[in-house]
Image (cartoon, coloured by chain):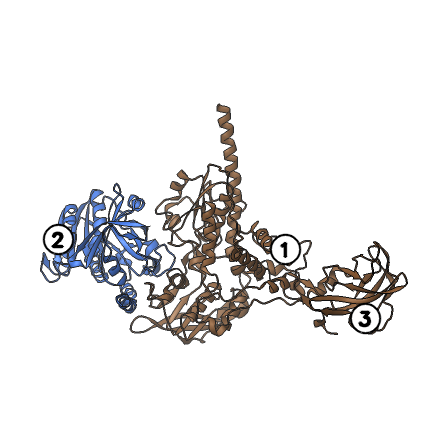
Chain colours: A blue, B brown
């Protein structure tokens, strides 16, 4: 059993942050890796990327958006409550090295994952430029944390309620055309955002890593539910990823696969309300 | 006289005896007493004589007391009053004159002799004759759930033998001097010995006998492919059907468990050495049990939240009840084995880190990576690997959705690609979750189906359809990106390939569309890369599995052993157990030598 030592509601309660006591995982987890959480006996196995860790205190941080039954169930947990299973770290860590200048792009809750990766790149000695986007001011998360680890930070909102109005691709295009020292772009967020980022960086020939979050059951390479097509080969996100070279990822296929369980999600939610 | 005249009661071979002259029977049944009754002349007087009618039991009684070693003057048929003495034959044991009656056996009538020396057990039947008699006991079927009912539930299909059936089946064993069945078993279970104990109604002892070499008979009795192992070698199988060794194994194991006769040994010795076992499947559990019993401290690391490996996530409830798996795992816990779930070795600890804390490591992680065929449209919704389908159903209990949160893949017309046991499991699971039609698509013919005959039979009974000599070419999707059809091509068998099976060749232009709204791909698995990512110095063979020394199952890394599917590729539960046993033995030898060396060194230093 794993205890929730701190709970924080963000974006009007639609995005939740948990600090979970998991000393063994905290000691091992690296940026880009994820854990799988099963709240109780009847629960699903939910993959969640680790947003931060404190190896000394034995704490890992996860941030998730409430989208369906399982995440709603997680929101109902309070500080001090216990989670039945937390398994991890899973997946391959992000390949972090000192490359000079890197550009970090996060959209929506993707910023949670990006934060951990960006922090690792900063600690490795890189000059970190960050772009974070959200729907509006309310949905923006981790602004302070991102400010701390970024040398430059641009914020965009779709409706212009905060920062620049528009999508992350606009400042991205500006940076790419103005600076030629950007060695790597890391994009984490909604699939459509990652797809558009990759489209742009391909033009400028800058290597772009993306972090994928497909449907997953076991997270250990067993089920194949998380299969994605990378460079025309079937790869498993949980053991070969979750980070891949964005230029090679088939985003359309991924988008289709991720929308498969919407009906079941609704049924499950209705059942739990009843 | 017909073959069924030889009746069988319990395990004892019941003989019906007849007069060679008038063909009247000598057998009588009074209440519960069954006897062979005839007359004899003893010291000039006619007396009554009673013999037990069982081949394996010698009992004789007479109406007057006969002194020890007394000899009868004559034996007479009570019906035609003729003498039964056979003048040409003498007793093979004591040389006395003998009487002859006839019994019926498989291919005709054979003589059965009764020695005139009172108490002499010689009957003149050769081993071959005995066999011919035993061969007439048919192989006993297990009572099972009705096929119309069972497709609506997940309860186990066969109920298992009753005591009567087990005794009857045990009576069929010929107790061969050189038992080939034992050679056919990957862990060499002493099969004739345990069956003989069953025949003596010592079921508990029979279970203990099996456990000398196989720790999990309740599991093996259910899931071993006996028809390809022990039962394939059974001599009875040459003339008739082999002894149902698996069903007997299951019977005694269930008896032991249900009667609460399982005893957990108390382990007093402690070697002060520690073993790490990676994976709690059949291989890992065997190593854990063996090493713990030898006095090692054992920790099992399991990646999932439930223990049991393939026994838990793979094999469905109706074939192997999870309560049995958990019973065996509880047994290990009571032995003192530590089990840690949610531990993905490679990530949370590397093998090298484990070697710092443990004296030896066993890798039994299985071959869990599903194989896809790389067809067009494979990423469509409602196309699952068998692993995902079974994991959702068995491990996550999706068939209880929405009580359990994991959604259940549901289809009206389900197609399963592949012909192995896993394919059968998927098809039968789909049937139980309400699919109207379930079809198995397999590229070879029926003869080559790798699944157990029993599973194929069960699947057919449950209404699963088989499209043989058929291979998928591509998938066709709906506008919502879920599958709605599968284009297939007809195949024919060509020349045998490297595996000895005839290679299936597509028949050009025979393409057709199979309507389906759920596809399960059950075409095999490969090695999981997680362990290798963090242990690059672990030598792998050309198929990507771990390379081991066949005699010890030690890998290229000293003190690191491996066994099961991660070494052989997809194989059976019992083979993984066999590999675990070899590794445990080798581990014990190596660690014992190390211990002795250390104590020697310590005493020298003193």
CB-based contact (under 8 Å), mark 1 and mark 3: no
Q: Are marks 2 and 1 in contact (CB under 8 Å)?
A: no
> Residue A200 in the image: x percent, y percent?
19, 59
Q: Which mark is residue B197?
A: 1
Chain ID at mark 2? A
The mark that comes first in sequence, 1 or 3, is 3
Tell me the quarter of the image containing the C terminus of chain A: bottom left
Please, which chain is the residue tagged with disc 1 on? B
- Disc 3 is placed on an element classified as loop
What residue is rendered at 51% in x and 64% in y? B451
Q: Quadrant of residue A54?
A: top left
- Residue A165, image x, y percentages: 10, 60
Can see residue A204?
no
Vertical order, B552 against A140 (above or below): above
Q: Choose mark 2 or mark 1, whichever is in front.
A: 1
Mark 1 closeness class: few <14, some 14–19, many ≥20 residues within 10 Å: many
Parent chain of label 3: B
Q: Is residue B413 left or right of residue B53?
A: left
Quick check: B558 above or below B398?
above
Kindly identify which residue carries mark 3. B19
Circles 1 and 3 on the same subunit: yes
Above or below, comparing residue A124 to residue B111 in the picture = above
Residue sticking out furthest to the right: B44
Disc marking residue A154: 2
Disc 2 from disc 1: Cα separation: 80 Å
Query: In this view of the protein, can residue B12 be seen by the observer?
Result: yes
Question: Same chain for marks 2 and 3?
Answer: no
Residue extending farthest to the front is B64
Question: In the structure shown, which secondary structural element does the residue marked by tag 2 occupy?
Answer: strand
x, y percentage for residue A228?
A: 32, 60
Q: In front here: A89 or A229? A: A89
* A9 relative position to B179: left or right: left
């Amino acid at each position: 059993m794993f205890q929730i030592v701190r709970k924080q509601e963000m974006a009007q309660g639609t995005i939740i942050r948990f600090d979970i006591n998991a000393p063994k995982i905290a000691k091992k987890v690296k940026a880009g890796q994820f854990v799988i959480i099963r709240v109780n006996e009847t629960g699903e196995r939910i993959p969640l990327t680790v947003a931060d860790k404190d190896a000394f205190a034995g704490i890992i941080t996860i941030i998730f958006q409430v989208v369906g039954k399982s995440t709603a169930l997680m929101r109902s947990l309070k500080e001090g409550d216990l989670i039945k299973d937390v398994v991890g770290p899973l997946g391959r860590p992000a390949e972090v090295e000192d490359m000079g200048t890197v550009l970090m792009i996060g959209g929506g809750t993707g910023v949670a994952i990006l934060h951990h990766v960006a922090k690792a790149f900063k600690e490795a000695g890189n000059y970190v430029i960050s772009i974070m986007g959200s729907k509006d001011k309310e949905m923006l998360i981790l602004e302070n944390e991102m400010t701390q680890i970024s040398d430059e930070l641009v914020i965009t909102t779709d409706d212009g309620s905060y920062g620049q109005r528009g999508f992350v691709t606009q400042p991205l295009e500006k940076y790419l055309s103005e600076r030629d020292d950007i060695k790597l772009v890391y994009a984490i967020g909604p699939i459509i955002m990652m797809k558009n980022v990759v489209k742009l960086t391909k033009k400028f020939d800058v290597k772009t890593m993306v972090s994928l979050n497909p449907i997953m059951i076991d997270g250990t390479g067993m089920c194949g539910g998380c299969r994605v097509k990378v460079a025309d080969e079937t790869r498993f996100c949980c053991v070969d990823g979750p980070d891949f070279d964005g230029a090679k990822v088939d985003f359309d296929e991924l988008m289709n696969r991720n929308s498969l369980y919407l009906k079941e999600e609704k049924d499950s939610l209705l059942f739990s309300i009843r | 006289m017909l073959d069924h005249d030889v009746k069988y009661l319990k395990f004892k071979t019941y003989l019906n005896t007849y007069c060679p002259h008038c063909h009247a029977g000598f057998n009588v049944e009074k209440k519960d007493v069954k006897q062979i009754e005839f007359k004899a002349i003893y010291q000039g007087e006619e007396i009554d004589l009673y013999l037990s009618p069982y081949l394996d039991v010698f009992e004789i009684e007479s109406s007057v007391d006969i002194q020890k070693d007394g000899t009868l003057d004559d034996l007479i048929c009570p019906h035609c009053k003729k003498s039964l003495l056979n003048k040409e034959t003498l007793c093979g044991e004591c040389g006395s004159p003998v009487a002859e009656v006839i019994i019926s056996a498989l291919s005709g009538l054979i003589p059965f002799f009764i020695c005139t020396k009172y108490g002499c057990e010689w009957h003149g039947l050769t081993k071959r004759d005995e066999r011919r008699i035993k061969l007439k006991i048919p192989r006993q079927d297990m009572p099972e759930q009705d096929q119309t009912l069972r497709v609506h539930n997940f309860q186990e299909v066969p109920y298992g033998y009753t005591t009567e059936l087990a005794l009857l089946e045990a009576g069929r064993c010929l107790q061969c001097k050189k038992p080939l069945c034992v050679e056919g078993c990957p862990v060499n279970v002493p099969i004739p010995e345990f069956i003989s104990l069953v025949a003596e109604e010592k079921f508990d002892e029979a279970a203990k006998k099996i456990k000398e070499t196989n720790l999990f008979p309740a599991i093996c009795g259910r899931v071993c492919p006996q028809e390809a192992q022990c039962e394939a070698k059974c001599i009875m199988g040459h003339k008739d059907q082999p002894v149902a060794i698996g069903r007997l194994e299951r019977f005694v194991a269930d008896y032991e468990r249900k009667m609460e006769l399982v005893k957990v040994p108390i382990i007093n010795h402690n070697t002060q050495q520690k073993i790490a076992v990676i994976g709690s499947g059949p291989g890992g559990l065997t190593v854990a049990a063996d090493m713990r019993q030898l006095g090692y401290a054992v920790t099992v690391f399991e990646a999932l939240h439930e223990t049991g490996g393939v026994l838990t996530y793979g094999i469905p409830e109706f074939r192997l009840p999870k309560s049995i798996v958990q019973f065996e795992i509880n047994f290990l816990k009571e032995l003192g084995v530590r089990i840690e779930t949610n531990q993905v070795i490679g990530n949370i600890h590397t093998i090298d880190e484990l070697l710092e804390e443990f004296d030896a490591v066993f890798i039994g992680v299985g071959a869990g990576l599903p194989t896809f065929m790389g067809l067009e449209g494979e990423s469509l919704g409602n196309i699952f690997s068998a692993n995902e389908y079974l994991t959702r159903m068995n491990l996550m209990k999706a068939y209880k959705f929405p009580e359990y949160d994991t959604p259940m893949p549901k289809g009206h017309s389900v197609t399963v690609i592949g012909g192995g046991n896993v394919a059968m499991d998927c098809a039968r699971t789909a049937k139980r979750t309400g699919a109207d039609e379930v079809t198995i698509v397999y590229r070879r013919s029926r003869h080559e189906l790798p699944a157990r005959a029993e599973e194929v039979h069960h699947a057919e009974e449950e209404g699963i359809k088989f499209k043989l000599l058929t291979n998928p070419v591509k998938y066709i999707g709906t506008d919502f990106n879920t599958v709605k059809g599968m284009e297939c091509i007809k195949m024919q068998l060509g020349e045998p390939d490297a595996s000895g099976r005839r290679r299936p060749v597509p028949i050009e232009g025979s393409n057709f569309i199979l309507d389906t709204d759920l596809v399960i791909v059950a075409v095999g698995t490969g090695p999981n890369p997680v362990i290798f990512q963090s242990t690059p110095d672990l030598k792998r063979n050309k198929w990507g599995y771990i390379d081991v020394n066949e005699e010890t199952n030690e890998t290229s890394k000293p003190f690191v052993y491996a066994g099961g599917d991660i070494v052989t590729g997809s194989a059976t539960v019992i083979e993984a157990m066999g590999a675990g046993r070899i590794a445990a033995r080798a581990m014990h030898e190596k660690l014992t030598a190390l211990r002795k060396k250390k104590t020697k060194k310590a005493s020298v230093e003193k």
